[in-house]
Image (cartoon, grey):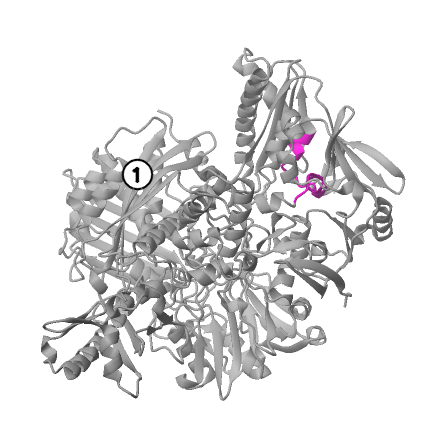
């Protein structure tokens, strides 16, 4: 059919060279080509945030990024949050505050929360709710997620 | 070495995997040689299939298999938990918008997608019924083939079943009641919208088959598959990884038989992951119209309730009739009601098959009956809380005659909620308050087996067939084993979701698992404790009757020994392990209208304070209080999360969720853009949850099941608050800004 | 998605050439938050998607250029909402940009993409109309500027010709003090597509500019020079009559899922009144 295009994308610090179909998205590439299944597929229209990743310093819905657009980009996924098997402060806070039920939305929530804390190190509850508004949780963990982000924000930053 | 006690809130078992992205949901699992499946549908709610031309689709590179009804073993298998009415794929007729007419499997997603576009289906669109009025019209087309119900007087109608429950004499009471309030309420069609779409995979497995599914009931699915495929149960392996949210929408078989048949035909694994739009077309809650006639006396006591509940179910019964029957049965609420008549009907329509959904038919009736009670109170000039308290059943009272009596000190729960909202304190200007009570019967039958293995080093493996879809069953069951056997929580492994390895569990539904599987696990632990006692008796030459084994300790008459120090010598040179088997059973009662009385009740009181921007119709929930009677919170944090999650879900159908149809019965708002659910910015300004623990439940340590209670009466409490703030009673959900605005516009000016 | 080819030109000339060659068979890609949804649902089926983000002139940039603020075509909603110049001089535009979807969408969606998509409900359109933006376009015949009010033709239709792409939006720096606000109606507090969008600005010469969207095939700008709406002392009936004249052309679609026509029309009036009030307050605060 259509020819593939060659891209180079750095994912979780590792540079990957791939041949991708132009009509595939970054989400497809992560899940299907790189076997990084932590990033989830749900609405595919940029509403639910389950596919949230960090790309070139900002969080995006990876379902709305074409594979070609990721050429030359630096991407971080949930798999890149923990360093050497040690949970990040944020991940630990999610566990401590019980901010996880079924867990399916959690990778996206973590990416959005990490981004928020990078922009606003001491967020208010309103900041958190706004910053994570693009991440739907049907289990309804919003309050616990908010508490977790507060907890991760407190204390000395790493 | 000590265990984690029940009543603690340790980190969720399985939490680590979920925060690292390591958790494998069905869609994350791949098998070598797998084919990707796609479903092919027609854009109609009701249509006759004239022909299907797959030649162009077959020519797509990478396509390996295309099936329609004609290609599958004949007669085409039909299945369903209540009626075997649902064909594995549409046969000659499409009965709802989204019913698959063809399915194909290809080497890649792209090939499958391209081929799906090329399947040519010739069809004739037929008139569809997708409203109650439409379905009940005498001239309406029949959704179900009448020959499926040969001796049923309703077979020539779209009424699937009618259920009647009652006591006393409503008509006599009606003559002497001081006030009768009659209203009709509607509850919308909503969908589960779990963030994980349904996903299925099947692979030939020797002379049998292995099937992965997001299913909540693995053993039930196993039975269905065995029947459809003509295999013994032992050759059907169902693997059920923890679902990413279920809420009832993943309880029953959907496309597993189709995928299984395709896998056997192709000789290779076949995987089908639904899109979010397809999940909206796979599962939903029943919509309902409920007419309530409430009779009260001047002293505020309820004289009678006369309830007619029509549930609009889908084209296939699934478990929807059970929803209507069970959901309406306690419809009068947890009150002393001298006379009652409840008529509930499940009514077929050319729509997505409705299925179980958190609350199981109760939220619909609650919406109507609690709203009507509020109206009655106001008409009497009585405080709506006071009216409820005056009629609330006391613990031990059979508020439904000849059924499980009230099993909690419910007044305590109600007063706690009233306290937390500040009921009786002055309401700030521009605001209103409402209060409502919800009740739901727990499981009426049940059967759970568990095996617990105490390994040589004191670590523990629990095998339990419950599905942990986020409610935290894995953690609670691990806590029970940990507490009983003294193993630290991270020394306990819980194995679930594999019918080849895990013993039988009837199902995960009706908030049953803590009680039923919890008791099975507890029972298995007791079994092990008993064997440990025998070991200790042998080792220490003590009479076993004088030994108590509890919480990880073997207590001899004159000393306490930690379990590992009995286990190691007790197992001896050969080593090994101790295997405990537990069973918890609730037998059916054939004479009971529901087949059994409730194992327990979920009881919740919700109190709401709102502010309404009347110019635009926006409701702001200023304070949302939810209090549940839980017996004992085995994991208080998880209990709180379940209740808050249920509360937020309730706000969804209260304020914003509904399917929107076009005039031909097609769903217009499939997907996330125009079907709105609460985001983090749609929360109440204050959400307060609490629970009452009196240790009076049938589960381990006095626990009751919970997790549905807090969704039951959200709508009725919010609408009561809106009524309080604006003077307007709204009887249709959701209370969108437009609906509220319109109701206020129509408000009689006086 | 239907397959397509993907090009990422590095110069404007390349992009123009590709556009001219392929015409409607090519689609421009900036943020992708509208396009990719349509690619997926099949409502657009281009043979070629042209990603403009590698073109130097398109790269995100907001800069003062003489008496105008120039916003390049690659500038995202997040960039807009955070930019000091935009927040100071065009606060209603910053407000509008800050409610387009959630963070993930705003990090990608571009201002230019929003207007080129030309949905009647485009959140940034009313503010751009009120602030009198110009659209700078590059095409086979060179550069041209199109007044924003001439840019919107109808739902999904703009004044761009074959081979043309927008390179920037230019906003004339305000000559007068003004108070302005962006308002909208949605179905929930969380991010949502609006069923009514409205921007109102009142300047210290008493001119009121009011633009609304999602009540007709394109967003509409109305101006009141009489001073009536800018004067808090204007009698209520005069104010209402003036507003009614401004709203006379509102034609909400009967087919919308998001809100019925009568509700939209009523909300237009409510937002109009509220917008005026807030604009006046903000104008007063700038004294």
Residue C127 image offset from top left, x and y in percent: 65, 30
In the image, B235 versus B123, the foreground residue is B235
Residue B211 image offset from top left, x and y in percent: 48, 77
Q: Which picture quadrant has residue B58? A: bottom right
Q: Is residue B487 above or below residue B268?
A: above
Q: Is residue A39 above or below residue C10?
A: below
Q: Quadrant of the N terminus of chain B?
A: bottom left
Left or right, B213 with respect to C71, comes to left
Residue B35 image offset from top left, x and y in percent: 61, 75
Outermost residue to the top:
C233
Magenta span contains residue B65: no
Outermost residue to the right:
C141
Residue B314 appears in view: no
Q: Quadrant of the C terminus of chain B?
A: top left
Dot 1: few (<14), some (14–19), or many (≥20) neighbours within 10 Å? many
Left or right, B396 with respect to B417, comes to left
Left or right, C52 with respect to B509, comes to right
Q: Is residue B108 above or below residue A126?
A: below
The magenta stretch spans which residues? C109-128
Residue visible at 48% across and 73% down? B212
Left or right, C148 with respect to B669, comes to right
Where does label 1 land, which residue?
A: B434
Chain letter of disc 1 in the image: B
Residue C95 image offset from top left, x and y in percent: 59, 32
Magenta span contains residue C123: yes
In the image, B19 versus B585, the foreground residue is B19
Question: Please, what secondary structure does the residue beneath circle 1 have?
Answer: strand
Residue C190 appears in view: yes
């Amino acid at each position: 059919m259509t020819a593939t295009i060659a891209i180079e994308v750095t994912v979780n610090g590792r540079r990957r060279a791939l041949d991708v179909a132009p009509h595939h998205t970054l989400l497809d590439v992560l899940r299907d080509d790189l076997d990084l299944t932590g990033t989830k597929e749900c609405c595919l229209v940029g509403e639910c945030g389950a596919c949230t990743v960090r790309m070139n310093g900002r969080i995006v819905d990876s379902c709305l990024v074409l594979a070609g657009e990721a050429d030359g980009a630096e991407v971080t996924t949930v798999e890149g949050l923990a360093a050497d098997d040690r949970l990040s402060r944020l991940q630990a806070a999610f566990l401590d505050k019980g901010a996880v039920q079924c867990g399916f939305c959690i990778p996206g929530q973590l990416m959005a929360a990490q981004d928020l804390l990078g922009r606003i190190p001491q967020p208010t509850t309103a900041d958190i709710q706004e910053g994570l508004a693009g991440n739907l949780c049907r289990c309804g963990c919003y309050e616990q997620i908010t508490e977790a982000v507060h907890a991760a924000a407190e204390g000395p930053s790493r | 070495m000590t265990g984690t006690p029940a009543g603690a809130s340790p980190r969720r078992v399985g939490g680590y995997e979920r925060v690292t992205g390591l958790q494998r949901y069905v869609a994350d699992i791949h098998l070598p040689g797998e084919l990707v499946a796609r479903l092919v549908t027609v854009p109609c709610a009701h249509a006759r299939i004239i022909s299907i031309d797959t030649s162009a689709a077959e020519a797509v590179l990478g396509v390996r298999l295309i099936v329609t009804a004609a290609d599958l073993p004949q007669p085409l298998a039909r299945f369903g938990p209540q009626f075997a009415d649902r064909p594995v794929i549409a046969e000659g007729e499409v009965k709802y918008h989204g019913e698959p007419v063809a399915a194909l499997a290809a080497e890649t997603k792209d090939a499958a997608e391209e081929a799906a576009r090329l399947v040519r289906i010739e069809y004739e669109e037929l008139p569809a019924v997708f409203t109650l009025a439409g379905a009940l019209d005498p001239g309406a087309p029949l959704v179900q083939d009448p020959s499926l119900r040969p001796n049923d007087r309703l077979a020539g109608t779209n009424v699937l079943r009618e259920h009647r429950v009652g006591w006393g004499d409503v008509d006599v009471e009606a003559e002497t009641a001081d006030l009768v309030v009659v209203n009709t309420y509607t509850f919308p069609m909503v969908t589960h919208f779990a963030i994980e779409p349904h996903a299925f995979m099947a692979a030939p497995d020797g002379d049998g088959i292995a099937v992965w599914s997001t299913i909540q009931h693995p053993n039930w699915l196993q039975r269905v598959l065995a029947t459809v495929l003509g295999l013994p149960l032992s050759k059907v392996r169902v693997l059920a990884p923890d679902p990413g949210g279920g809420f009832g929408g993943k309880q029953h078989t959907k496309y597993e038989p189709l995928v299984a048949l395709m896998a056997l035909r192709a000789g290779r694994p076949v995987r089908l992951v639904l899109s979010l739009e397809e999940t909206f077309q796979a599962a939903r809650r029943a919509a309902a119209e409920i007419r309530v006639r409430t009779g009260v006396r001047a002293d505020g006591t309820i004289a009678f309730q006369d309830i007619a509940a029509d549930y609009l179910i889908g084209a296939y019964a699934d478990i929807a009739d059970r929803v209507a029957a069970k959901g309406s049965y306690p419809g009068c609420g947890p009150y002393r009601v001298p006379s009652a008549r409840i008529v509930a009907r499940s009514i077929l329509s050319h729509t997505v098959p409705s299925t179980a959904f958190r609350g199981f038919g109760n939220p619909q009736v609650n919406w109507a009956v609690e709203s009507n009670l509020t109206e009655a109170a106001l008409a009497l000039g009585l405080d709506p809380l006071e009216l409820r308290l005056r009629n609330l059943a006391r613990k031990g009272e059979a508020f439904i005659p000849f059924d499980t009596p009230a099993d909690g000190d419910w007044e305590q729960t109600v007063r706690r909620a009233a306290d937390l909202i500040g009921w009786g304190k002055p309401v700030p200007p521009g605001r209103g308050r409402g209060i409502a009570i919800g009740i739901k019967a727990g499981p009426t039958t049940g059967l759970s087996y568990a095996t617990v293995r105490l390994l040589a080093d004191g670590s523990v493996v629990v095998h339990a067939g419950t599905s942990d879809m986020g409610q935290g069953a894995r953690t609670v069951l691990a806590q029970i084993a940990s507490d009983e056997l003294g193993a630290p929580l991270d020394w306990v492994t819980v194995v679930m979701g594999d019918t080849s390895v895990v013993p039988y569990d009837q199902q995960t539904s009706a908030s049953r698992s803590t009680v039923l599987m919890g008791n099975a696990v507890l029972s298995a632990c007791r079994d092990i404790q008993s064997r440990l006692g025998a070991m200790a008796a042998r080792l220490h030459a003590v009479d076993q009757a004088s030994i108590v084994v509890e919480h990880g300790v073997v207590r001899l008459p004159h000393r306490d020994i930690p379990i590992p120090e009995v286990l190691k010598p007790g197992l001896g040179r050969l080593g090994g392990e101790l295997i405990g088997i537990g069973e918890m059973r609730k037998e059916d009662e054939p004479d009971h209208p529901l087949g059994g009385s409730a194992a327990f009740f979920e009881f919740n009181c919700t109190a709401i304070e709102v502010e309404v921007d009347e110019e635009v119709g926006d409701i702001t929930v200023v304070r949302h209080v939810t209090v549940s009677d839980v017996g004992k919170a085995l994991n208080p944090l998880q209990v709180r999360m379940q209740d808050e999650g249920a509360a937020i879900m309730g706000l969804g159908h209260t304020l914003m969720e509904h399917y929107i149809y076009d005039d031909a019965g097609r769903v217009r708002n499939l997907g996330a853009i125009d079907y709105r659910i609460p985001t983090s910015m749609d929360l109440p300004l204050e959400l307060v949850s609490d629970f009452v623990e009196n240790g009076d439940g049938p589960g381990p340590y006095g626990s009751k099941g919970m997790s549905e209670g807090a969704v039951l009466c959200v709508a009725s409490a919010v609408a009561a608050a809106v009524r309080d703030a604006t003077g307007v009673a709204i009887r249709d959900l959701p209370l969108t800004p437009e609906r509220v605005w319109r109701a206020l516009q129509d408000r009689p000016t006086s | 998605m239907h397959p397509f080819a993907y090009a990422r030109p590095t110069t404007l000339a390349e992009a123009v050439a590709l556009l001219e060659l392929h015409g409607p068979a090519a689609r421009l890609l900036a943020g992708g938050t509208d396009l990719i949804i349509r690619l997926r649902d099949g409502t657009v089926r281009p043979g070629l998607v042209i990603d403009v983000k590698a073109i130097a002139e398109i790269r995100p940039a907001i800069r003062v250029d003489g008496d105008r603020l120039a916003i390049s075509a690659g500038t995202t909603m997040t960039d807009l909402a955070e930019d000091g110049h935009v927040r100071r001089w065009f606060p209603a535009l910053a407000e509008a940009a800050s409610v387009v979807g959630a963070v993930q969408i705003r990090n990608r969606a571009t201002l230019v993409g929003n207007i080129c998509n030309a949905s009647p409900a485009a959140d940034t359109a009313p503010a751009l109309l009120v602030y009198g933006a110009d659209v700078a376009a590059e095409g086979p015949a060179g550069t041209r500027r199109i007044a924003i009010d001439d840019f919107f033709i109808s739902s999904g239709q703009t004044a761009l010709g074959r081979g043309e792409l927008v390179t920037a939006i230019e906003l004339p720096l305000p000559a007068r003090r003004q108070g302005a606000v962006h308002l909208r109606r949605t179905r929930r507090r969380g991010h949502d597509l609006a069923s009514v969008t409205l921007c109102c600005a009142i300047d210290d010469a008493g001119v009121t500019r009011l633009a609304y969207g999602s009540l007709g095939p394109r967003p509409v700008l109305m101006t009141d020079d009489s001073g009536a709406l800018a004067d808090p002392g204007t009698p209520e009936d005069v104010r209402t009559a003036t507003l009614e004249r401004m709203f006379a052309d509102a034609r909400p679609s009967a087919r919308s899922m998001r809100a019925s026509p009568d509700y939209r029309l009523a909300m237009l009036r409510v937002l109009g009144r509220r917008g005026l009030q807030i604009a006046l307050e903000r104008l007063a605060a700038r004294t």
